[in-house]
Image (cartoon, rainbow, N blue to C red):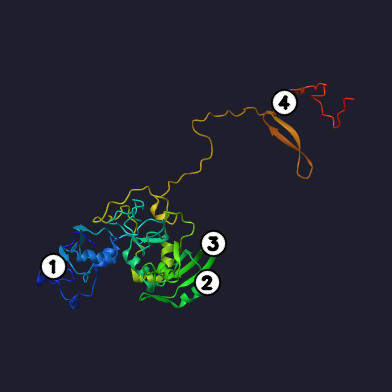
Amino acid sequence: MNVGIVPREPLCYQPSLGSGTMVDKDTVHKGGERLARVIARAGLASRRQAELWIAAGRVAVNGALIRSPACNVTAQDRVTVDGEPLPARQRTRLFLYHKPRGLLTTHADPQGRPTVFQRLPQDLPRLISVGRLDFNTEGLLLLTNDGALARVLELPATGWLRRYRVRVHGMLTQEKLDELRAGVTISGIHYAAIEATLDRVQGSNLWLTFAIREGKNREVRHVLGHLGLEVTRLIRISFGPFRLGELAEGALEEVRTRVLREQLGARLVELSGADFSTPLVAASAPRERDHGHPPARQESRHHSWRDHDQERPPKRLRRAFHGARRDAPKLERPTTTAKRTDIVTDRRGRRVEVERHGEPPQPEAPRKFAPKQKRHFRRRSPDRASGPRPRHPRSGR
């Protein structure tokens, strides 16, 4: 949003009714973009969280307090959250994070439990998770600075497949897992088709591969619990085209812009309004300020997917140096012009007479080697104690 523009009334307010007076939704101007979506694009929160901020009276447009998300704004409007203007829009970025067990997928927890975002490096912008992973679930978690993209990717309509490796306690057959392909209804909640494969049996435990597209709350645990199995370990190994691979636990990697654009495709880029042309900015967007403690500061790690060509300063060119240094002592060339002839043999064995200049090479002095030292061995005494013991000792008779 531009700062310093002459304030005007937002498109969801009527000037004659005074600042802060609502207009019916049918009379809202269709131009511009939804306010919650603009806040999400700035990387401050997801669209759902932005709508809660609007309802709580934390958002203002051109100085007018907004209390309904049914408000459209344009590039000429000045949007503030808690009195501070929105940060400049950044390029859409996506990160792969290997979430360990024992972390909450939230920015702050009222009970003070550790969260994913407290473990991230401090030099990153404010990131939003694409979906969630439970406290005891580990594996791949997608993080992005674009709230609109996060919303599009986590929708079941997007159809991205999410694969899990599951260790369960109990016994089950592959035929029973094949019945999940038709879907299942548990406690009034219908779960769509699930692809489940029995990988191996390990004592009283089973290792399964689960593939789902909806990602409802605790879907894998509820479905397996319905089959009489207890989930003892749950690892997400892929989300759409992005895989966990060899990413170490707790590590973070950024997807290159070119790879991200190709994997999203034209349809998802249009739906999310992802921006890949805005240059990266050094300053990170402010983290959420109204909950919990500030995130723990950590040293930034290496991101193997980061676009180095756009973030790294240009290299300083260095010419290849050939020759001696200026301060090196100069070698005096021989001033003699004596010439001599010599006979050499070419590759075919023919003798050729050549002309040589300069002093002839000095013959090498013969090498002096130390004389061989004689090895002195201890002479064995002829007594029987030091000699070999006879096989059949003589008798005393």
How far separated are the C-alphas under marks 1 and 3?
66 Å
- Give the foreground label among 2 and 1: 2
Q: Tag 4's secondary structure? A: loop
**Which residue corresponds to mark 1?**
20
Q: Quadrant of the N terminus?
A: bottom left
Q: Tag 2's secondary structure? A: loop
Q: Is residue 17 above or below residue 58?
A: below
Q: Are marks 4 and 3 in contact (CB under 8 Å)?
A: no
How far separated are the C-alphas under marks 4 and 3?
74 Å
* Type of amino acid under label 4: Arg
* Type of amino acid under label 1: Gly
Say the numbered circle drawn on residue 367: 4
Q: Which residue is drawn at the image coordinates 13% and 67% (left, top)?
A: 20
* Type of amino acid under label 3: Gly
Mark 1 or 3 closer to N-term? 1
**Which residue corresponds to mark 3?**
203
Front in this rendered view, residue 129 or 384: 384
* Type of amino acid under label 2: Thr
Mark 4 or 3 closer to N-term? 3
Q: Are marks 2 and 1 in contact (CB under 8 Å)?
A: no
Task: Determine whether, in the image, residue 151 is placed left or right of residue 262.
Answer: left
Residue 356, position in %: x, y?
70, 33
Q: Residues within 10 Å of mark 2 (few under 14, many from 20)?
A: few
Mark 1 or 4 closer to N-term? 1
Q: Is residue 217 above or below residue 353?
A: below
Mark 2 or 4 closer to N-term? 2
Front in this rendered view, residue 188 or 370: 188
How far separated are the C-alphas under marks 3 and 2?
14 Å
Residue 101, position in %: x, y?
41, 56
- Give the foreground label among 1 and 4: 1
**Which residue corresponds to mark 2?**
173
Residue 374, position in %: x, y?
77, 22
